Image (cartoon, helix red, strand yellow):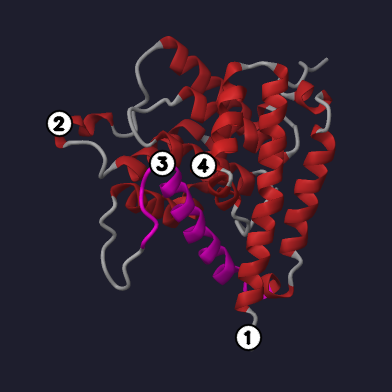
Amino acid sequence: MTDADPLGPLLDLPGVPDAVRDARAAVDEVHRHPTNRKGWPTTAAEASVRAARASAVLDGGGAEIPAGGAVDDPVLAGALRISEAIGHLLATWRRAPLQALARLHVLAAADLVPEAGEDTLGRPRAGRAVSARLDLLAQLVAGGTSVPGPLLVAVVHGELLDLAPFEVGNGVVARAAARLTAISTGLDPKGLTVPEVACLRRADRYRDTARAFGEGDPDGVRDWLLFCCETFVAGAREATSIADAAVPS
């Protein structure tokens, strides 16, 4: 007899199964877009940049990328570094999530910590509670659950926002980890969608539902799961606009 799936009860929350189906259907439709059948590397690259810009703004950074110049905003620079590294980190995320998480933090926070604090890069805050929660999250990412992709993405995202395991850069790291999870679970294997833009456009609800998830009340957890599924539906619309714009005239 196998142990019960630790995230299985999430599928019993009202409205969650339907929201999961809607999210998966929206993402699947984007992958069937004619442009994305062969031209997906181009649309995925654009999606990645939009995701980085939205994620940076959510953490108080800028969104402007100078033409031909270096990005001065440290939050945006970190988010863009992550966007370039996602593909390289995918295998590590599947096999050794904590190692990938440390790398995400190094990329996100390299310009955010003073020289005296460089030894904090990639290192979670000390404490048994932080370590235990990260270990549990890593077990889930590495195959400890069989719930649908949208739910695991939401749990990874929400848990990292609530735990804030690093001294700085936690929001950008949490959203990058969620993006890695969406790709690794097969929910969005090519990274075409941009749920981060939906989070930015509904920033107050994003923060409120994330806070409710962290409190652990079933209604709050449900609201976060539903919100995350909604962001994939909206993120799929963003992806469709990218693909439509890429169609040769």
What's the residue at 64%, 62% (across, down)? 239
Q: Which residue is mark 2?
A: 116
User: How far apart are the alpha carbons under marks 3 and 1?
Assistant: 35 Å
* Magenta-colored stretch includes residue 62: yes
Confirm or deny contact between disc 1 and disc 2 (CB under 8 A).
no
Q: Quick one: quadrant of the C terminus?
A: bottom right
Q: Which residue is mark 1?
A: 248
Q: Is residue 127 above or below residue 8?
A: above
**Disc 2 and disc 4: Cα gap in Å?**
27 Å
Which residue is tagged 3? 59
Give the spatial CA distance, label 3 vs label 4.
Answer: 11 Å
Q: Look at the image and give the residue range highlighted in magenta.
A: 38-64
Instruction: State yes or no: residue 248 in magenta.
Output: no
Spatial CA span between label 4 and label 1: 32 Å
For label 2, the SS is: helix
Dot 1 amino acid type: Pro
Residue ranking furthest to the top: 128
The outermost residue toward the front is 204
Q: How many marks?
A: 4
Closest to the camera, between mark 3 and mark 2, is 3
Front residue (pair 175, 135) = 175
- Quarter assignment of residue 102: top left
